[in-house]
Image (spheres, rainbow, N blue to C red):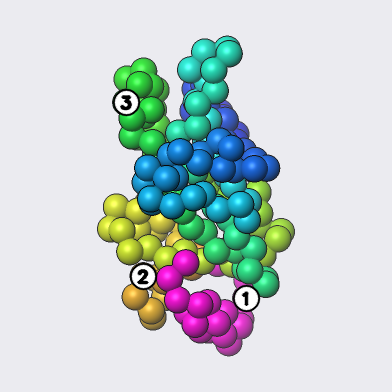
């Protein structure tokens, strides 16, 4: 069995310092903006060979008071197509790279927050978010992953507090 950090053959998921160094161009290609220098960059790397490690999937985990805001998630489809077919099938059967990045992040940062929040306006991303453990809130596009027991009042207060931020 593989660990959360190594969910597939020739893959490693890790939190990196200086995320834009690894995913800056991909971020510009996807979002037409610079990758954030803040937060924790979580990257899934594919070991193409022993001297080449390629970033394939990324998400930013931004601590905000006592929660983490999950944003900027993306997968490089061009690189994904270069991955051998048998590994691509393994990844798809395991829920996908973004799913694995989320699961790694939920485990890795669990002690650092009371909940994870996301803003999911993309239908495909939302499907993965929900499969990984996020759930809907009363506010359109705002989702939450409760990974520790919190009272109903505390949950409601956190949801309203994050909703006031707007899209992130």
> Upstream in the sequence, badge 3 or badge 2?
3
Q: Nearer the viewer, mark 3 or mark 1?
A: 3
User: Gap between marks 3 and 2, in whole Å?
Assistant: 29 Å
- Residue 96 at x, y percent in the picture: 39, 39
Where disc 1 sits, the SS reads loop
Please tell me how crowded label 1 is: few (under 14), some (14-19), or many (20+) other residues with Cα within 10 Å: few
- Residue 125 at x, y percent in the picture: 35, 53
User: Gap between marks 3 and 1, in whole Å?
Assistant: 42 Å
User: Gap between marks 1 and 2, in whole Å?
Assistant: 22 Å
Q: Which mark is residue 150?
A: 1
Q: Which residue is mark 2?
A: 141
Q: Tell me: residue 133, above or below residue 64.
A: above
Q: Tell me: residue 153, above or below residue 70.
A: below
Boundaries of the magenta span: 146-168
Considering the image in quadrants, where does the N terminus appear? top right
- In contact (CB < 8 Å): disc 1 and disc 2: no
């Amino acid at each position: 069995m593989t660990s959360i950090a190594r969910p597939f053959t020739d893959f490693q998921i890790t939190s990196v310092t200086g995320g834009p160094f690894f995913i800056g161009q991909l971020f510009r290609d996807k979002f037409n903006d610079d990758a954030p220098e803040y937060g924790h960059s979580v990257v899934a790397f594919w070991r193409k060979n022993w001297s080449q490690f390629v970033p394939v999937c990324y998400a930013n985990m931004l601590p905000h008071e006592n929660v983490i805001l999950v944003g900027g998630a993306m997968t490089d489809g061009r690189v994904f197509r270069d991955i051998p077919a048998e590994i691509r099938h393994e990844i798809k059967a395991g829920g996908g790279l973004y799913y694995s990045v989320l699961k790694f992040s939920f485990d890795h940062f669990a002690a650092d927050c009371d909940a994870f929040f996301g803003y999911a306006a993309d239908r495909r991303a939302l499907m993965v978010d929900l499969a990984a453990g996020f759930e809907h809130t009363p506010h359109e596009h705002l989702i939450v992953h409760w990974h520790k027991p919190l009272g109903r009042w505390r949950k409601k207060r956190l949801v309203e507090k994050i909703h006031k931020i707007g899209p992130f």
